[in-house]
Amino acid sequence: MEKMTNAYRIAAVGNHSLELGFKLAGITESHVAESAQDSEATILGLMQREDIGIIVLTTGIAAQVKDRRIREAMLSSMKPLFIVVADINDTAVSEDNLRHLIIRALGIDIMKNNKS
């Protein structure tokens, strides 16, 4: 009996620190984006690949994206799944991103404050 595996790759798009961190973690598919156009071209290329299951972006890269197709995919796509992580200099907490991931995975907002 032939064993089927659906192994998807994780890709990262960000700054040099993100690339180094992911390479240290064993993620070989990491890209440094120097400009908004470079970011969009890299993300679009990754979105079109069948082997990419997760695309990790920094908040800085995500903010640079102006292309409507990419922005919509970042908000709603399940494959590839987009995960936005804080830049190394970003002091904002990523609770909202985590909340959106949970809503997408479960279909409900478990973090909603029910004061009824």
Image: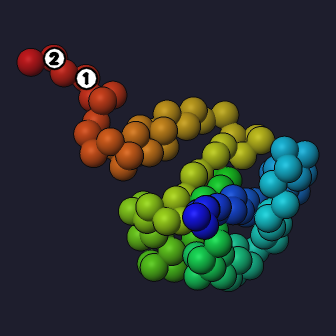
Res 115 label? 2
Residue 25, picture quadrant: top right
Label 1: how many Cα within 10 Å (few below 14, some 14–19, many 20+): few
Q: Which x, y percent locates residue 85?
A: 64, 46
Residue farthest along the left direction in this orientation: 116
Query: Which quadrant is the C terminus positioned in?
Result: top left
Label 2: how many Cα within 10 Å (few below 14, some 14–19, many 20+): few
Is there any visible trace of residue 40 in the rendered image? no
Residue 11, picture quadrant: bottom right
Q: Which x, y percent locates residue 94?
A: 55, 37
Residue nearest the observer in this picture, 23 or 114: 23
Q: Is residue 115 above or below residue 67?
A: above
Residue nearest the observer in this picture, 77 or 74: 77
**Amino acid type of disc 2?**
Lys
Q: Which x, y percent locates residue 78?
A: 44, 61
**Amino acid type of disc 1?**
Asn
Residue nearest the observer in this picture, 52 or 32: 52
Q: Residue at the spot x=54%, y=58% of the render? A: 82
Contact flag, marks 1 and 2 (Cβ < 8 Å) = yes
Count of number-bearing discs: 2
Res 113 label? 1
Query: Which quadrant is the N terminus positioned in?
Result: bottom right
Res 64 label? none
